[in-house]
Image: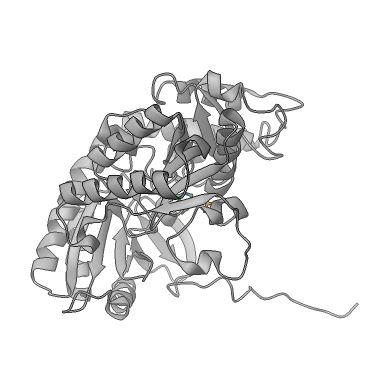
Amino acid sequence: MAEQSAELSPLLKQATPVLAARGEGVYIYDEDDRRYLDFTAGIGVTSTGHCHPRVVEAAQRQVATLIHGQYTTVMHRPLLALTERLGGVLPRGVDRLFFVNSGSEAVEAALRLARQATGRQNAIVFQGSFHGRTMAAASLTTSGVKIRAGIGPLMPGVVVSPFPYAYRLGMSEDAAVEYALRELDYQFATVTSPQDTAAVFIEPVLGEGGYVPVPPAFLRGLRERADRHGFLLVADEVQTGFGRTGRFWGHDHAGITPDIVITAKGLASGFPLSAIAAPSALMEKAWPGSQGGTYGGNAVSCAAALATLDVIEEEGLVDNARVMGERLLAGLRGVAAEHSGIGDVRGLGLMVGNEFTTADGRPDTDTAARAHRIAADKGLLLLTCGPHGNVVRMIPPLIVTADQVDSAVAVWSEAV
Ligand code: PLP
């Protein structure tokens, strides 16, 4: 047989040239043992840091015991223990859950659940939303045409309403909330009847769309409309859950309870695992067998998630995210004050975005990309986001220390 070796698809575009050899805490080391301060956390995944000893130990033990036991055939202890444990951190009443493997799958599952439970079809999302790349999740995603281009027709029945993005709208936060709620009501009067609406999907911090925290008054406005019209409020906590924003859930900042909570990323410190939680009354309306999948609730992922929850609790990572997030935000605002190209710095906990704009207020993608690349050259790994790619975002592991935050701010200052 002729010899052939495969090559990586050009679709996998890498933003930095780093070839990671190992990770430890907040650092990634490349194959030459060069150290990088990782303010990406694998896109918000390795919240407990790279290879936290507790997570490593739990996963190693589980690998040697039972790797996979499919829950429709045999149940296993890590899945049961994690289910029970998550009950202690989920909002009161949102106490039934099941597992899949990724954020997109969890979003798909939430949409199926919402449609089955309400008997309604339409979904509302907000400009700049990101809910994933599978077909239904891509249909709910509006943070960049590349996710949707060339794959249509997308799912019908998705209505896109303005997000209260105060900086881009050139308004105060209060005015932006009032505007976005008014526009939502206008959609209900003109495009989708609330009685046809199954659910509204919202990220408590607009993630890929530019790292814009949702004003609490907006979330409360959605909760009030969901109650009034009988549709479901779905909190996509894939990026914001498990302490990332300085509260356990992003929606905690608004003091509301969603009907469905979607989680992934920070749940298992890098092992693939996601979960969908809803009250029993909703779950019972879903059709048995219509949800789940072969790998959902993998035993090793569940063991890693249990260790992750231990670490979050014992090391006080939710509080650390809040305190370090405030420090990071203040440092970055100081940098922006000295550089006219950064129009806005905003964030919640350890999700902080720096939006680059030109002198006349247009998105400045080139300068953002350059600052991002120079930071990587100087040993600081960052990510970009926003529909124009002009927001440089920082999402370090939740274990980050004050010294590491200050180092990142110093490197960022040089880079911009
Ligand atoms: N929802 C949100 C808010 C996300 O940020 C992401 C990924 O970044 C997803 C869903 C999709 O998750 P995944 O990439 O695991 O499919």
Q: Where does residue 194 sit, x and y in percent of width and height?
A: 45, 38
138 relative to 60, above or below: below
Confirm whether residue 60 shows in the render: no
Q: Residue at x 28, y 74 (%)?
A: 363
* Quarter of the picture holding the C terminus: bottom left
Nearest the viewer among 43 and 55 is 43
Indicate the position of residue 408 as horizontal and vertical percent values: 23, 62
Q: Quadrant of residue 170?
A: bottom left
Extreme front residue here?
A: 190
Q: Is residue 27 left or right of residue 133?
A: left
Q: Nearer the viewer, residue 18 or 71?
A: 71
Quadrant containing the N terminus is: bottom right
Where does the image place residue 306, in percent across and percent down from the top left?
49, 30
Observer-nearest residue: 235 or 46? 235
In the rendering, at what x and y percent does residue 218 appear?
27, 41
* Residue at figure coordinates x 50%, y 47% from the top left: 270
- Left or right: 243 in relation to 22: left
- Tell me the residue at 47%/58% (across/down): 22
Residue 108 drawn above or below residue 17: above
- State the image quarter where residue 316 is shown: top left
